[in-house]
Structures are given as structure tokens and as C-alpha cells.
Amino acid sequence: MKLIEIIKMKLFVIILFTAFFSLKLTGQVFPVNFCWIQNENHGLDTEKWKEWLILKSKIQKPFEWVQISSIPTISGGHLKFQLYLHNLPVAGAQANIMVKNNGKGLAASFPQIPDLNIDKPSIYSDSWIYISEKFNECKTRDERKQTEFGLFWHRYWEDSHGNELYNQNMLSHYSDSIGLVSIFNPDPLTKAGVVYGSPYIDANDQNLSVLQPLQDSASLDLTYSGSTFLLKNSAAEISEFDPPTRTIPQSMNGNFIFSRTDPGFEMTNALYHISKMKDRIDSLGYNHLVNYSIPVDVNAMNGSDNSAFDPGTTPPSLLFGEGGVDDAEDADVIIHEYSHAISHSASPNTLFGTERQCLDEALGDYFASSYSRNLNYFNWQKVFSWDGHNEFWNGRSAVNTQMKMYPNVTFSGIYEHTDLFVDPLMRLWINHGSNTVDNLVLESIHNWTSGMTFPVAANWILAADSALYGGNHSSDIHLQFARWNILTPKANQKESTDIKKPKDFHIHTIWMIPPDLQGKRAEILSSSALRVWTGELPESIDMGSWKSGIYYLRNSNGISKILLQK
């Protein structure tokens, strides 16, 4: 997602990683401790877990933990707590306990709270914020308004004199009947196997001859009301709530086929990809996430080159801008923004701290990469491959090409180091497949809290693997995050011991497929990453009509090279 540059735990045995994962206690962010839980079995008895949390986090009156939610998932449940001081909430201080289906505690994270004497607050105050190594009583104030750049929503923490102590942007920016809709799947450049540049350019939404054939039509569940099909279903609803205003089309026969010059194209494209992503998370067992039809305005933000997830509406909503390449034309942008809705649904009101906000951006980039790569391998590492990587903005990467090492990075902005966290996830994606890694990510984000860091998030992925897969992938998960020092490297850990490397193949005309691969879903890609074959692998494939050269076999084992020499 892009943002306009001017513009957030009686324990008998416990293995504790006291993770001062924040590089330092900077202003409003508390260091977050992560621990593995053993020999504690309270089921979902929140009062007993609350007692455990009080002891483990070493808080005393006037501090207390207040449960804010309990979310059941396929692995068990996630208990969430908010820290209160003198009966008022402390900004950016949450705790999470993950409980397995058998009632045993698996892991927990909670902030490290300074041992300070704090007087009772005045009647004026409604919360506390930790600034300059002390707890400051404050009043929160929200400001929402329309600006020349679109919707503006900031929250301010102010002292009794109205002086600003801290502010936070509350928007997460980017950046039943069957109908037929127009889409890019996932975008024109990926489908064509080319990079941005003439003639494959935006050209102010013109219906260029090279772009028109790259549009697809697709079937989609739509709402049928009376005698009219609407651009609405259980996943999303195309709406108009932010300027500029466009007429939302309706159809008598369910056909919504538009050229890209028509505003209706962005509407159908956004609705389609959000619907498919909702289908995806539902199919993995997480249908409680974003369990509402999310309103979507594809021509919003006053036409600026910016998009956002707005958690402040009921229900939360998505806004896409039209500056540069229209954001709703690129599935990467659409899935990225929808990922903020997924995150908010799993762990609401936890976007406190720059590194935590960066994790949310990384989440969006991961799901955008995972979604698009499942559709087409070409240039998968380029996040926002149509909307970015052009004259409008540089886009982002799903690969740590700059070889950044944690913690030798500075989180001065929330978009700078997303690639550092997405890279290990996509390496795991290659090794174990999208279903496994998507599951791990979806399960782990239920434990995200304010002030979280990359190492804490990585440990929660390990916890998810323990709960979902009995720890089958833990060695490789640790390896990939240790590659960039997010987790501490283990002694004598080598990549070759964690996964079986796919073998390469040398073929002349007919490829006799090894028995262990037969019947597996796979695809074969050309050297330019164009899909040339897909399906279940048979006993053999006749490549007599194929051009000599290098091809790539992609399946659940990973990527193999095929050298065809006639």
C-alpha cells in the first residue's frame, strides 16, 4: 500500500523469551515479551488466564488486565486483554494468550510495564499514554474531515491544557445470483508477461489496443434485488461515500462488462478480487474474519493516487484513489487494502507503534504476493506490479534484495522495511505452498498486539505451526526468519537439512515423469515465467513441439528446472 509522502501471564514450567524486541523504549511503545507456555491448562476460563497474566506480567494495582475479546479459530482460541490504569485504558498496551483445542496454553505476549507510582487521574482524562518515561493522563480527540487528498482521520492524545502529546493516522493506507464482470486477473502486465513501459502504460485510462485483450470476463455471485442485479454480495458492496461521485451501474441480465475507460470496470475488478480473497480465507477455516460485506468506493480520495482501509465506519470500509494508475485496477492494491480489514478483524485496535504498523503493511504485501503468485508466476516479487514500478511511484518488493539485517534497520516510517518480513514468508511459500503459509499467517495475526516487533510476530508464526501442524514446519520457519536475523540462528542449522531440494530434469523429447510426482498438481513455466502447462502430472509429457530451452516445474515440492535439449 502506498501513502502520500506528506501524510502507525500458577505456571510450573515456562520457556520465556524475554524479548526486548523493541530496539529501545521509544516514547509510546512498550517492549513486548513473548513466551511459550507449558503445564497450564485452563481451557477458555478467562478469569484463570487473567490471574496467570497478572502474575506473569508482574503488574500490581492500580494496573489491571481487562479482557476485550475471545476469538475461537481452527487451532483453539485467542484471549485478548487491554491494560488499564486507575480504570482507564493505557494506549498501546495489550496482551494475548493462545490456547489450543485441548485447553492447554501454547504461547503469550504482553508488554513490559515500568514499575512507577502513578497518581489518580483527573475527571478530565479518558486514557493514559506513556511518553518520556512516564504515564501521562490525557484526553483523546478524533478529527475526521475531507481534504484535497481525500479522507483525513487522525487521533490526538492531549493533556489537560489541550497540548498534543501524540497523534496517529487512523487510516490504514495503501495504498446469490451469478453475474458476469470485467476484470484484470491479476493485472495486465502480469498476464502479458511484460514490464511497465510503452505501449503497456496507463495512458489516463484509455482503452489501448494492447490492454483490451488483457481484460478477462468472470462469473461472480451478485445480489439480485427485484429484477435488478447489483454490484454487491456477501463479501463486498460497491458504494459511493467519498468524492468524487460516480454512478454505480445496475444490470437487468447480470452482465457488467466494461472497458477500462468506464468507471464500472474498476468497480467490478475490486468486487471480484475482494470476493475471491474472502472465499480464500473462508475455505481455510477463517470465515469469522471480515464477516460482513465491506463497503468499497473505487473512485475516492478526491482522485488522488492513494488508497485506504477505514476502520472508523460501520462497518469498516475501503477507499481507492484514481491518481496515476487507478488503484482498483491492480489486484495487488485491492488485496493489500483488504488485508488491513483482515488484520483489523483478527486483532482490532492494535496499530500502535511504527514497527507494528509496518507489520500490517507487510501483511498486506504478503497476501497480495501470495494471491497474485497463485494466479501467475511472472514478476511475483514486484508488489503493485501495475499500479507501481512506473513513473507514478516505485512500488515495493516481496524479496529482501537489499539484504537488510534485523535489528540493523530504523523504523522511521511504516513502509520502509516491509520486504524484510515478507521475504521469509514467500520463501516458506515456495517450500511449503500457499495453503500452509496462508494458514500460518491467518492464525498468527489473531495474536498481534500494539508495540509488536518482527521477532514477536515470527514467534507467533512458530506458535501457529505448533497448533495447526504439530510443529512440522518449525525448523524451516526458524531458518527463513533467522536468515535476516529476525530470529536468532540455531547452531549447525543448514538449509539442506530442513527441506528436500527439488531435483532438476534433463529432457530430450518425452519427459517420463517420476512416480513420486505423478498425480500431483503442477505447472510448467517458460524461462520468461509464462505458464505453458498446468494440471495433474501424468506418466509422461510429450515436449516434441516445445522450443528447446529452460523451463520451470512448480508444485508443492517447490521449483525444479527442466532443461529441454532436442
Image (cartoon, helix red, strand yellow):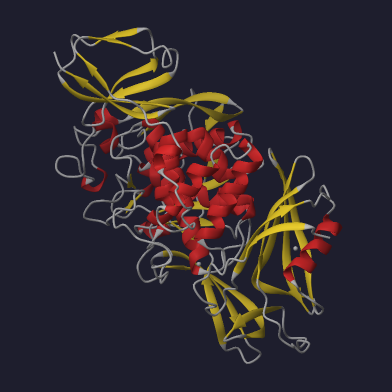
Residue 123: x, y in percent? 78, 86
Number of numbered markers:
0
Relative to 281, residue 168 above or below: below
Quarter holding the N terminus is bottom left
Residue 130: x, y in percent? 62, 80
Residue 237: x, y in percent? 54, 41
Quarter holding the C terminus is top left
Indicate left or right for 300 with 155 as reference.
Answer: left
Indicate left or right for 196 with 74 as reference.
Answer: left
Q: Residue at x 60, y 88 (%)?
A: 162
Indicate left or right for 121 with 153 as reference.
Answer: right
**Residue 318 appears in the figure:** yes
Q: Nearer the viewer, residue 353 or 426?
A: 426
Q: Residue 290's image quarter?
A: top right
Relative to 180, residue 200 above or below: below
**Residue 298 appears in the figure:** no
Q: Residue at x 37, y 71 (%)?
A: 6
Q: Residue at x 28, y 32 (%)?
A: 191
Relative to 51, residue 277 above or below: above
